[in-house]
Image (spheres, helix red, strand yellow):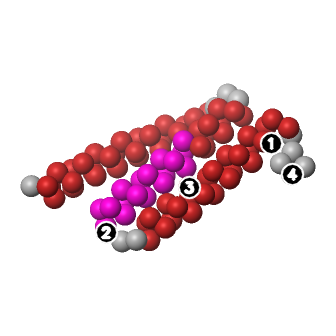
Amino acid sequence: MSEAVLHWALLAAQVMLGLAFVCCAWRVARGPRAQDRVVGLDALYVNGMLLLLTFGIRSGTDIYFEIAMVIALLGFVSTVALAKFLMRGEVIE
């Protein structure tokens, strides 16, 4: 019983994360300002990371978790760099 519940919960989570991924991609493509696009990119990498985590739980392999950690680190650094660029006009001082 619990394996079936886990299967359906993961499927529902993946469908909802896929929809959220599409909504964030739309915000990145159609954002009226650069700040909206940065927020969309931030949410996009979080949704992608969570989607990979659900794939990792479903398949039982560790590679998805490692890829998700790399995406989380690179996503955070890129968000900080983009925010600094939008505030000051340069990334490296």
Q: Earlier in the sequence, mark 2 or mark 1?
A: 2
Is residue 55 rendered magenta in the image? yes
Q: Mark 3, residues whose alpha carbon is within 10 Å: few (<14), some, or many (≥20)?
A: some
Q: Is residue 28 left or right of residue 64?
A: right
Q: Position of residue 26 (x, y in %)?
A: 55, 37
Q: Position of residue 16 (x, y in %)?
A: 36, 42
Q: CA distance from mark 2 to mark 1?
A: 39 Å
Helix, strand, or loop for circle 4? loop
Q: CA distance from mark 1 to mark 4?
A: 9 Å
Please provide the residue range marked out in magenta. 43-59
At label 3, which amino acid type do we have? Ala
Q: Position of residue 41 (x, y in %)?
A: 60, 43
Q: CA distance from mark 2 to mark 4?
A: 41 Å
Q: Earlier in the sequence, mark 1 or mark 3?
A: 3
Q: Which residue is mark 1?
A: 85
Q: Which residue is mark 4?
A: 92
Q: Mark 2, residues whose alpha carbon is within 10 Å: few (<14), some, or many (≥20)?
A: few
Q: Find residue 60 and name its label.
A: 2
* Residue ranking furthest to the right: 93
